[in-house]
Amino acid sequence: MDFLAGMDPRATGTRRERLLASFASLEHHEDALRRRIEEGLAALPGITVRSRAARRTPTLLLTFEGRDATDAYRHLAGREVAAPAGSFYALEASRHLGLGDTGGLRVGLAPYNDEQDVDRLLEGLADFPLTAP
């Protein structure tokens, strides 16, 4: 608990108050990165963002016109961007959404991500060919 409460070095007060401040700071940080990703994705043709909840974890599910998410995963992995592909133990939900058994590409953010990580992701997706080689 002390580690989590100390994630915002500016936070003061009781451990509970510092914990609340740290979580608020983390949420602000991750939301800013998520918005930056969403803005960057909006400029890229052929990519569909499948997650639109008003309040959610900073995780996006992407699909690609004419390409399998696994191809995008491999492409990004070659650029040292970690973004797994699959149905993520939600096969029925994946099928219901029309994503079939292969699902989509999951882009998740964490406290350790920064703007350079977002840039590498967007650059990797920008040069991902939408037609199979």
Image (tube, rainbow, N blue to C red):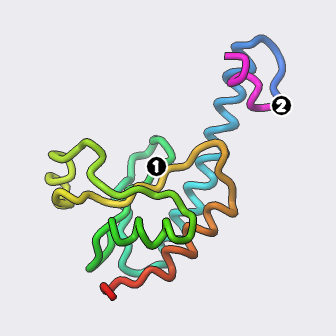
Is residue 19 inside the magenta stretch?
Answer: no
Q: In front here: 71 or 48?
A: 71
Residue bearing the label numbered 1: 59
In the depicted structure, whether residue 80 falls above or below residue 25: below
* Front residue of 82 and 61: 82
Q: Report x, y in % for residue 112.
A: 66, 45
Q: Residue at x 36, y 79 (%)?
A: 46
- Identify the image quadrant of residue 70: bottom left
Q: Which residue is mark 2?
A: 9
Q: Residue at x 38, y 73 (%)?
A: 47
Image x and y of residue 69, in percent = 33, 66
Alpha carbon distance from label 1 to label 2: 25 Å
* Main SS, magenta residues: loop
x then y, percent, for residue 34: 55, 55
Number of marks present in the image shown? 2
Q: Nearer the viewer, residue 22 or 122?
A: 122
Q: Is residue 21 left or right of residue 35?
A: right
Helix, strand or loop at disc 2? loop
Residue beneath the point at 35% across and 68% down: 48
Residue range corresponding to the magenta coloring: 1-10
| 28 relative to 8 in the view: left or right | left
Q: Amino acid at mark 1?
A: Thr
The kind of secondary structure element at disc 1 is strand
Q: Quadrant of the C terminus?
A: bottom left
Give the amino acid at mark 2. Pro
Asked whether the residues under the numbered discs 1 and 2 touch, taking CB atoms below 8 Å apart as contact, a structural biologist would say no
